[in-house]
Amino acid sequence: MNIGIRWNENWDGSVTITGYTRNGGDVVIPSEIHGKSVKSIGDLVFEDCKRLTSITIPDSVAEIGFGTFFGCTRLTSITIPDSVTSIGNYAFRNCTGLTSIIIPDSVTSIGNRAFEDCTGLTSITIPDSVTSIGNSAFFGCTGLTSINVDKNNKSYTSEDGVLFDKNKTTLIAYPEGKKGDYTIPNTVTLIDKDAFAGCTGLTNVTIPDSIKSIGNEAFSDCKRLTSVTIPDSVTSIGNLAFSDCKRLTNVIIPDSVVHISKYSFFRCKKITIKGYEGSYAETYCKIHNLKFKKLVERNRRNLINNK
């Protein structure tokens, strides 16, 4: 059988695809090689195969490995069978030609950055079988306007196309292609790492006083964000949380905040931080040479009364 595929036999007699030597085009992976069942597609097998346009995976395959289709920029069509349980880290990273993908309800795990930089994706549906979604799984998907979760999923949920944990206490991912203003639900206590990163269409965000922590890079590169009010429930602001928010000019930080990472406002050159005299925010601005404007006690009372 000469189809440009390299393979290894596993200890159980099954086969893992380990390499590909042809130019691409439409590729059909066989379910058996020399009578042995193909159970997995290994790491980086089709990496940077620029001419790969479509691929059909047989229903014998249970695992798509690390970076399997990394950089297959012309890949526009893929059929994932309902035998697959795991999509590995970086599996489809930078598959910019991929406009849609159906994740079958056999999949339980989606790896870190699995679909990163898939700029052609506009929506994605998480089936009820998924119990684990890795960090930044949809980071850089600039065309993505909605992430939808099956209502029967026991680990995750979605609302208005935004991804949350099941209890809606952690906001995991806001689609980068979604535009306009957004109010975070008041059930949320944590804004996760990268949750709003790269959301260049986000013009305003209302953060409720249920939030306790803003994660690393949470609002990084939100280019249209001009002002943010941090509620007095928040105690910490993570590393690079608002980095590269070029238009961010005003941030109100209450005296409940006792930790701001060194690079939380990295490259926010127009920023003025507003806070109370003697607060951690004032100390932070002095250390990092940022503009600080004092809020008077009357403003503090107004903020409290308007909650």
Image (cartoon, helix red, strand yellow):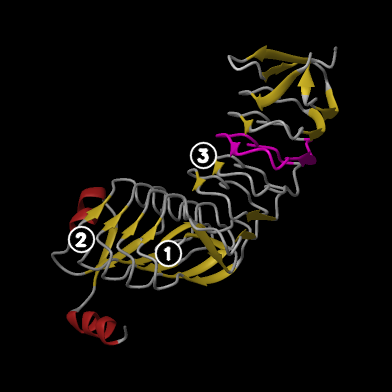
Disc 2 to disc 1, C-alpha distance: 35 Å
| Residue 47 visible, this angle | no
Total tally of numbered discs in the picture: 3
Give the residue number, with chain letter if any, for mark 1. Answer: 167
**Residue linked to disc 2:** 282
Query: Which sits in the foreground, 173 or 225?
Result: 173
For marks 3 and 1, the one nearer the N-term is 3
The C terminus lies in which quarter of the figure? bottom left
Q: Position of residue 139 (x, y in %)?
A: 56, 46
Q: Residue at x 86, y 28 (%)?
A: 25
In the image, 248 versus 253, the foreground residue is 253
| Mark whose residue sits in front, 2 or 3 | 3
The answer to the question of whether label 3 and label 1 lie on touching residues, with beta carbons closer than 8 A, is no
Is tag 2's residue or tag 3's residue first in the polypeptide sequence?
Answer: 3
Gap in angstroms between the C-alphas marked 3 and 1: 22 Å
Name the mark nearer the viewer: 3 or 1. Answer: 1
| Magenta-highlighted residues | 74-96
Q: Type of residue at label 2?
A: Glu
| Rendered location of residue 100, percent (x, y) | 74, 49
Residue placed under numbered mark 3 in the picture: 112
